[in-house]
Amino acid sequence: MKELISKLSPRHQITLQLLLIHLNKYLFLFIYFFFFFLFFNILNLIIIFVFRVAANSNENKMTASSLGAIFGQIILRPPADQVYKVSKQSVIVQFMIDNAQQLFV
């Protein structure tokens, strides 16, 4: 890599250095948004799947509230130093399941 850079003209070397400095500034934002969209897509898949399971609750007896209780701890895991009530998590996940078609279109 150093050999390639040394073959560049001084003007191009400076341009490359400035480009790398600029990229380093925005690398954190890129990684942050990449993982945010990755998490959102995985959440989308999980909630749509669980919505389909809840849609057949008359056959499988798995309602949105019971699925919310199961997946609430998995999807909305609190930090280790904080204790949340399970009911809050399950209600939020139940809401996402009930409104999956509006939230994740």
Image: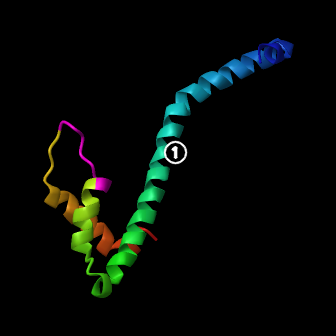
Where does label 1 land, which residue?
34
**Residue 26 at x, y = what percent?**
54, 32
The answer, for residue 102, to whether it is visible in the render is no
Q: In front here: 3 or 87? A: 87
Q: In front here: 33 or 51? A: 51
Residue most toward the bottom? 58
Q: In front here: 14 or 94? A: 94
Q: Is residue 31 left or right of residue 76?
A: right
Residue most toward the front? 60
Question: Residue at the location (67% across, 25% down)?
Answer: 19
Looking at the rendering, the stretch of residues picked out in magenta corresponds to 74-81
**Residue 1 at x, y = what percent?**
77, 18
Q: Residues within 10 Å of mark 1 (few under 14, many from 20)?
A: few
Question: Residue at the location (60% across, 26% down)?
Answer: 22
The answer to whether residue 95 is above or below residue 17 is below
The answer, for residue 67, to whether it is visible in the render is yes
Disc 1 residue type? Phe
**Residue 80 at x, y = what percent?**
22, 38
Main secondary structure found in the magenta portion: loop
**Residue 87 at x, y = what percent?**
14, 60
> Could you tell me which secondary element the residue under label 1 belongs to?
helix
Q: In front here: 27 or 12? A: 27
